[in-house]
């Protein structure tokens, strides 16, 4: 089928698929069936399904869209009552599914055939053609049944859009939408919420709540009972499902029917037989991959989570475990399975095992959908033991801010602030009261009773005081009740008990009596430079309080995970407790995280007790994790202990068959070894060249600075001020990709050649870019100063660029740009450092799989940030330095210091200068020999014919091959080997 066979061959294959895969009788299949009005023919019809066969959907999809509504309308006349008529269009390689929504054609699914996994096609078609009970809930099966290209999602999403158009402006619905949006800003450090994402989250939450009911074999009669959690509460299960932000469809006509239809889709899965966290696969298959990358959402594979759990929890029946950023609950699932196995080995009664689970394994996450997933994952982890639960089972997974951003000191105590969107004053809750679980629940009951009776705030204050609160705490809650009462009267009430109960759980868990023995998980990896202005300020101050903030050039490399390490240990871990967190590989050796490793962290002491190097395991989180290509490690620590990291790490190496590989597949694919702890990257140099080399400036946004000559009209450009336009390219980044580049005449003195990283090849300079460089005699010009100097063309160019910069660049909390365009261009004086015209400069690439170096003798050229440069005192010194940098020996000696990309080390920066590379001395024979060999290499490189169309990496490879063939490459390697000590 995948080869797009001819029409009749495809008909035969589709017929065979229906008969062999779904038991369709030959007599039930209708071919070339005429429509009732004889206006066309249906290629294949089977019951309520019509199938249109095409030669190539890439060209014929428009024809499908025109014909399919008539086919579906015709077929629906004869379908059984209550059965939805569905249309399929296929060319064999792709299947598109459609349904009619109130007479309008709605796409409900797409599947591209994978020839290596034919069973996945059957799984995708199964809910449409033959709902089979008792399906094993593997991650793939669940994703195919409910993911973003599934028929279930296609149908539900169209209906959710209709429901949203009906009730989206309801005050209570809008409040829930805004509260959800506020929580996501805490999760991601930026504004990511959209109506489309809210609808996806609604679909997913309804689905997982239905799955929770199915675990207990409960019939779903009343959708409101299911979504609110009353259905499970009636069975003694509390906290697995709660009324939250996503029950809004029930306010619209037809919303209850949508909930019932989604719940019916879950019936066929044997949910008590799950072996892994299947819900994370559902989430990842639902949210668009590009969107997940932007959000940094990549959950830990089960094989890794299971290994971390086994290493960190040696006594599962005794140790209290908390995942402070639990996501879909992968670590909770494996912690529970380990506890259950230990309980069975100890021959404990099943009910006692379940009770211990509820008392030992906790999760928190501020992401509302992650919490819904994790709660059901927690329940699924019990398997058949759910039948042996105690009369009341509370699922201990909470929607809360584990970093406690909203905790504010208040005299000798503290208070928690709960935002009320859009602009109301926050609700204030005493932190001391929130840390007393029983007292807080009684206070919540009083607040709810007060709302039911519209009591006066003073009466609620007195009732809470009688329940045991201090006078000050009762008075604060009385004032809070007055706000809640007004919200109730405004129709914005039915969410606050859920919000208060959940968001204050972290305060309870951080009480010394409730802290964990093991803090485990995979906290958010969000780099400082990608946070919103407000979150940047908060993270900076928080890290400073632990002595973990590193400013200067390293400031933008700070990461949210460092705060989880420090604050998690301080607030949630008992003395002597264990940390086991999945982190970026940089945690092992990057200078920005040295404070985590060397004992200089303040407020809490944590000694590193072990580490796992996973930089050679691929894939773990896909090509990208969070916001950049990166590699992975696991870091283990012990609270209130001193000491440096051990001398060795456990390292795994291998390529997995897929990211969600099973434990058995991981065991087969990965080799384990002990290796030296990764050498710490340092800013301290062993070579005198470190202080001489600088990085070029960030000409960003690129389309404001890099230009191409624009076509001129009949009048032509002026020779002294040619007309140029900003160059658009694939290296442009958001939000600038949507911003029109400047265009106009610019004085020729400011149009300069620029050497990029891709301009550098071994011993040879490749093509230079052309750019507008707004600098004159060491002064960075703005539109105003350029105009004052009489440079009208440059002034107009900068005026356009500055206006766009002010509109689209990162903002401070007050909405002003964090830096001007001129300040950004001259960050750390990297541009003005090139004001002096230098006859000879050495250049080398900032990143790549191979280091490349050459020299430039154009004193009017500028160097971009993707290259490092230094002035050379002579051509011989330039050749000497280039020879050392181009050598394989230098690359091999810094490789273990490099950050690792998807598969290979990527960045060099100043790492080469950690090697003892001596300064050039013409009197030293070895130095002179290296310089001579490099000049010979430059002659060889210059003679190489390079195809104009070749990529710059291919050009570098061709040059290296020529150097090897000439023999000069081997000469240089031997000389560098002699130069550098072993």
Image (tube, rainbow, N blue to C red):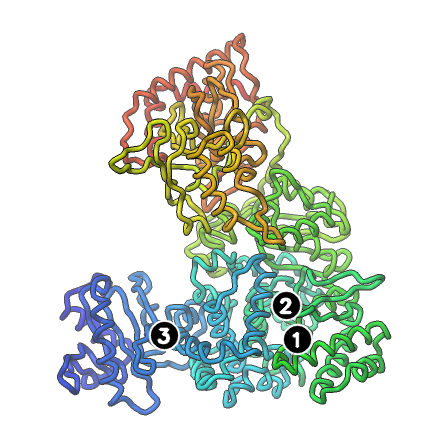
What residue did someone put label 1 on?
353
Residue 545, above or below 284:
above
Q: Quadrant of residue 820?
A: top right
Q: Disc 1 or 2, which lies upstream in sequence?
A: 1
Viewer-nearest of discs 1 and 3? 3
For this orientation, the residue located farthest to the top is 923
Badge 2 element: loop
Q: Is residue 244 left or right of residue 148?
A: right
Residue 886 in view (yes/no): yes
| Residue at (52% x, 21% y) in the render | 836
What residue did someone put label 3 on?
151
How many marks the image carries: the answer is 3
Q: Disc 1 or 3, which lies upstream in sequence?
A: 3
What residue did someone put label 2 on?
423
Q: Is residue 263 left or right of residue 404?
A: left
Q: Nearer the viewer, residue 23 or 415?
A: 415
């Amino acid at each position: 089928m995948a080869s797009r066979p001819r029409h009749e061959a495809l008909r035969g294959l589709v017929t065979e698929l229906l008969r062999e895969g779904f038991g369709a009788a030959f007599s039930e299949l209708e071919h070339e069936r005429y429509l009732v009005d004889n206006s066309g023919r249906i290629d294949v019809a089977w019951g309520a399904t019509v199938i249109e066969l095409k030669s190539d959907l890439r060209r014929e999809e428009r024809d499908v869209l025109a014909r399919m509504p008539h086919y579906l309308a015709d077929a629906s006349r004869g379908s059984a009552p209550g059965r939805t008529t569905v249309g399929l269009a296929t060319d064999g390689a792709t299947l598109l599914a459609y349904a009619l929504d109130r007479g309008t054609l709605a796409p409900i699914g797409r599947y591209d055939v994978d020839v290596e996994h034919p069973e996945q096609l059957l799984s995708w078609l199964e809910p449409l053609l033959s709902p089979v009970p008792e399906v094993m809930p593997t991650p793939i099966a669940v994703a195919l049944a409910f993911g973003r290209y599934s028929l279930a999602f296609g149908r539900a999403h169209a209906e959710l859009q209709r429901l949203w158009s009906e009730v989206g402006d309801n005050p209570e619905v809008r409040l829930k939408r805004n509260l959800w949006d506020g929580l996501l800003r805490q999760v991601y450090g930026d504004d990511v919420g959209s109506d489309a994402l809210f609808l996806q989250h609604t679909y997913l939450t309804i689905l997982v709540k239905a799955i929770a009911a199915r675990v207990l074999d409960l019939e779903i009669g009343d959708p409101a009972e299911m979504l609110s959690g009353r259905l499970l509460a009636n069975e003694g299960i509390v906290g697995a499902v709660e009324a939250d932000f996503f029950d809004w469809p029930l306010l619209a006509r037809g919303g209850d029917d949508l909930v019932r239809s989604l719940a019916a889709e879950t019936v066929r899965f044997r949910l008590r037989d799950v072996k892994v966290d299947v819900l994370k696969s559902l989430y990842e298959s639902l949210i668009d991959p590009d969107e997940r990358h932007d959000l940094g959402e990549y959950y830990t594979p089960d094989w890794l989570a299971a290994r971390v759990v086994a290493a960190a929890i040696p006594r599962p029946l005794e140790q209290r475990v908390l995942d402070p950023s639990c996501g879909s609950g992968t670590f909770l699932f494996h912690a529970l399975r380990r506890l259950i196995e230990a309980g069975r080995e100890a021959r404990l009664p099943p009910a006692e095992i379940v009770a211990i689970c509820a008392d030992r394994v906790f999760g928190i996450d501020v992401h509302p959908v992650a919490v819904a997933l994790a709660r059901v994952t927690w329940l699924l982890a019990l398997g058949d033991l759910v039948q042996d639960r105690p009369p009341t089972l509370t699922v201990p997974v909470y929607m809360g801010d584990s970093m406690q951003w909203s905790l504010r000191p208040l005299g000798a105590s503290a208070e928690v602030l709960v935002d009320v969107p859009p602009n109301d004053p926050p609700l204030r809750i005493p932190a001391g009261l929130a840390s007393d679980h029983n007292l807080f629940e009684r206070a919540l009951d009083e607040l709810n009773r007060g709302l039911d009776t519209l009591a006066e705030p003073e009466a609620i204050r007195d009732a809470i005081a009688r329940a045991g609160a201090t006078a000050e705490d009762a008075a604060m809650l009385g004032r809070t009740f007055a706000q809640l009462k007004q919200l109730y009267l405004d129709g914005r009430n039915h969410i606050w008990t859920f919000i208060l109960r959940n968001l204050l759980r972290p305060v309870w868990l951080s009480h010394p009596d409730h802290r964990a023995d093991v803090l485990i998980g995979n906290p958010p990896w969000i780099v400082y430079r990608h946070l919103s202005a407000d979150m940047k300020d908060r993270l900076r101050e928080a890290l400073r309080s632990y002595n973990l903030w590193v400013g200067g050039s390293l400031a933008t490399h700070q990461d949210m995970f460092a705060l989880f390490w420090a604050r998690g240990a301080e607030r949630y871990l008992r003395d002597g407790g264990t940390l086991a967190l999945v982190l970026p590989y940089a945690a092992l050796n990057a200078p920005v995280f040295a404070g985590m490793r060397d004992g200089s962290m303040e407020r809490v002491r944590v000694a590193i007790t072990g580490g796992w190097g996973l930089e050679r395991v691929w894939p773990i989180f896909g090509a990208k994790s969070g916001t950049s290509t990166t590699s992975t490690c696991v870091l283990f620590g012990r609270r209130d202990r001193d000491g440096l990291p051990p001398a060795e790490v456990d390292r795994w190496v291998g390529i997995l068959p897929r990211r969600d590989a099973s434990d058995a597949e991981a065991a087969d694919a990965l080799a384990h070894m002990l290796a030296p702890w990764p050498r710490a990257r340092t800013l301290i140099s062993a070579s005198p060249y470190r202080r001489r080399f600088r990085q070029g400036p960030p000409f960003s946004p690129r389309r404001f600075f890099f230009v191409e000559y624009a076509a001129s009209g009949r009048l032509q450009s002026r020779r002294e001020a040619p007309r140029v336009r900003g160059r658009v390219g694939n290296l442009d980044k958001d939000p600038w990709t949507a911003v029109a580049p400047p265009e106009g005449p610019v004085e020729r003195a400011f149009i300069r050649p620029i050497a990029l990283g891709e301009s550098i090849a071994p011993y040879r300079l490749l093509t230079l870019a052309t750019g507008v460089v707004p600098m004159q005699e060491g002064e960075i010009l703005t539109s105003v100063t350029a105009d004052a100097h009489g440079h009208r063309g440059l002034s107009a160019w900068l005026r356009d660029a500055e206006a766009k910069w002010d509109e689209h660049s990162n903002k401070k909390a007050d909405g002003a740009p964090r830096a001007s365009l001129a300040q950004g261009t001259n960050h750390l004086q990297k541009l003005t450092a090139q004001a002096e015209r230098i006859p000879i400069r050495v250049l080398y690439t900032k990143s790549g799989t191979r280091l490349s170096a050459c020299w430039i003798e154009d004193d009017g050229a500028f160097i971009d940030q993707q290259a490092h440069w230094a002035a050379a005192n002579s051509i011989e010194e330039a050749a000497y330095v280039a020879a050392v940098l181009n050598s394989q020996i230098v690359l091999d000696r810094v490789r273990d210091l490099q950050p690792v990309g998807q598969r290979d080390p990527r960045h060099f920066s100043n790492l080469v200068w950690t090697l003892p590379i001596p300064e050039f001395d013409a009197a030293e024979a070895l130095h002179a020999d290296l310089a001579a060999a490099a000049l010979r290499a430059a002659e060889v490189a210059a003679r190489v014919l390079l195809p104009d169309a070749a990529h710059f990496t291919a050009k570098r490879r061709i040059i290296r091959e020529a150097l090897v063939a000439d023999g000069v490459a081997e000469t240089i390697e031997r000389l560098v080997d002699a130069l550098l000590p072993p």
